[in-house]
Amino acid sequence: MTFAYAFKLEGGILKPTSLAGLVLIILGVIALAYQGITYTTQKKVLDVGPIQATKTEHKTIPLSPIFGGVALVGGIILMIAGAKEA
């Protein structure tokens, strides 16, 4: 079995379904914990010769708790389905 089809983890094999489930569980927990991604942008508001003025804007991409819950439940379902395949 190649790495593309299975990921070896301490003597066992983590199937692609289980790996996808694990990733969804991690993303779900992060989404529930942070509830949004915040980033900063700088916008130039004045540019006259050597004089420049910038404005810093803080923006947030909200992550709904529903998204986190769905990702968490979906990940658990995929982990169970991956375990039944073995």
Image: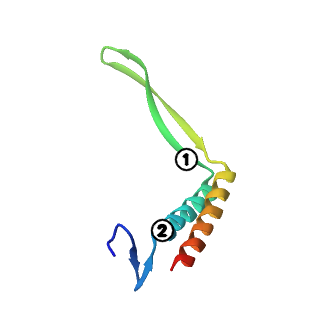
Dot 1 amino acid type: Ile
Q: In this view, does 55 lie to the left or right of 49?
A: right
**Rendering quarter of residue 12:** bottom left
| Circle nearer the N terminus (1, 2) | 2
Front tag of 1 and 2: 2
- Residue 65's disc number: none
Q: Residue at x 58, y 71 (%)?
A: 81
Q: How far apart are marks 1 and 2 (CA)?
A: 24 Å
User: Is 34 in front, or is 81?
Assistant: 81
**Quarter containing the N terminus:** bottom left
Tell me the SS state at disc 1.
Answer: strand
Query: Going 52% across and 68% down the picture, which residue do you hit?
Result: 22
**Residue ID for mark 2:** 19
In the image, residue 1 above or below residue 34: below
Residue highlighted by disc 1: 37
Left of 51 or right of it: where is 30? right
- Expressed as whole percent of the image width and height from the top left, the position of residue 42 reads 44, 31
Q: How packed is label 2: few (under 14 Cα within 10 Å), some, or many (20 or more)?
A: some
Q: What residue type is labelled 2?
A: Leu
Where is residue 3? Give x, y as percent: 33, 70
Residue 82 drawn at (x, y percent): 54, 73
Foreground residue among 69 and 4:
4
Count of numbered circles in the view = 2
SS of the residue under disc 2? helix
